[in-house]
Amino acid sequence: MICSLKDSKTLSSTLTVFLFTLSSVSLSAQNIDSAVRAFQNKNYENAAIEFFQVLKTQPPASVLSEAQYGLAASFDKLQLNMAALKYYEDIAVVGSDHPYFDKAIEGLVSIAERVKDDFKIPTVIDPLYDANLSALEQLNPGLLQRLHFVLGQHALNKGKVQDALGFLQSVREGNPAFARSQYLLGLIRLGVAQNSVAPSYPKALTHFDAVRNTISLDSDNMDERYLRDLATLGIGRASYEQAYLLEEGDPERDRLLSESIALYRSIPRFSKAWPDSLFEQAWAYTVNNEYGKALGAIQSLEDPYFEKEFFPEARNLRAIIYYYNCQWDRVNGVVGDTKAMFNPLVERAERILQKGETESDWVSLLESSLNASKTDGIPQQIANRIAKDGQYKKMFRFLNELKREANVFQNNPTFASSNIGQELTSFALETQQAFSTVLGRFIQSRLKSVTSELSDITTRASLISLETKTAETEWLEQGRAVEGQVRKRLPRPFVPDETYQFWWYNGEHWIDELGFYEYTVKTECYE
């Protein structure tokens, strides 16, 4: 065959490209084999570096997909959750055509469970669900149900109740996500996140009972025990709400109130749910006309042990109890103290909101405000309330995970000396900065809502004061004495049995007394 010089040059160029491609494929294959061996030998740091190097060589599709998954899995094994999330996400967004799509979904679900994430990972998976439904339905049933919990929780957070029901109801007994799914279903049946929807108490109780039957009282998993306590609170609230709707003197009302109180009292002392149970006990006791026990529950919440808890409405409840017993001077005293405490907090919070802090500054402002010595930040009581918010805790944990991983990539000897260390440090820091803005926006929103709540409480305190003045005027018109009554020490409260001891309260604080305080209150109302 005779060819021109031009043809010869073209052939030579094509052959060079072909040989280079073969060389590149061969090199990628060698590198991926080395990375896989490191992974199999549990040398996950070196495996991550080698998988990363493979990705940078622009390998053929088959090697690329294996390197993507190998890198994500290596980080997963190292508990570098955000880095693993990044590369699992790269796989997931390709869809079911990616050979490691199912593995990436499993990795994302596992990370969501590990870091308790219900905002980032669901937003990755949710848009992919319908387009990849046939592939997702082929997942292991246990994994699919865990995925459905993640999506169900996300749907509920977004107010898409019907979607949430569909996902959560598919989680079966025996699955690790079953108890959590049942708890959320119980909340839905109580009408949470729904407007003008009547609660379905029997269904709610069925779901909450399923949680309590799934998790034992002596579980050594603190998260599980807290979930069980929350389910108990849910049943107590359902009983209280039903009782509240019935007329006084109705035997069913009395039964439901007693049941509610018993459930609240069954919450273990010093558990995370205990403060809420004490507050709700106080309301149930009040509705049940057990005013001394209600005041005792309020006093427990005001003990220094609960200094980081904040139940501002408890002050108005105390005033209401004194109002029901016609103790006008005590009502006025509580109302005056309430206004004196909360009005300055509202004014200070409103000044901070008007400053126009940048969204990213709110995170550091809240952290510094949690220090009691800071006087120009968010009022500490409000800061504690925000920091205790469940959604804030999840977001703060997510932010701390980013900080931790940035530190690992900066200081780990293996990673710090490689390109992967520099790239993943930048990724963690940039994501951290972006997420600080999201968290800051949340803190600002919560500050507005808590400030509004405190303002409403002082308004209700003013209404109680107005009602009290009206009652005092009526008494004066009838020739009754409003002031100057001499109160004597009343008999001690009933002591249930010999396991209880009694002594008069003298202003001291003993942790063993918490939850057992009880007042003796005598009505001063005229017949």
Image (cartoon, grey):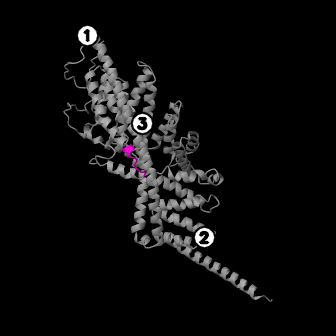
Left or right? Give the position of 433 relative to 519: right
Q: Residue beneath label 3, please? A: 233
Query: How far, Cα to Cα, is label 3 from label 2?
Result: 53 Å
Q: Nearer the viewer, mark 1 or mark 2?
A: 1
Q: Which residue is mark 2?
A: 63
Dot in front, 3 or 2: 2
Residue density around tag 2, few if under 14, some if 14–19, many if 20 or more, within 10 Å = some
Q: Amino acid at mark 3?
A: Leu
The image shows residue 378 at horizontal and vertical percentages of 34, 45
Q: Are marks 1 and 2 in contact (CB under 8 Å)?
A: no
Q: Is 382 placed left or right of 171 in the picture?
A: left
Residue 71 visible from this viewpoint: yes
Query: Given contact means CB atoms under 8 Å apart, are the residues at marks 3 and 2 in contact?
Result: no
Which stretch did the figure color magenta? 352-359
* Sequence-earlier tag: 1 or 2: 2
Type of residue at label 1? Gly
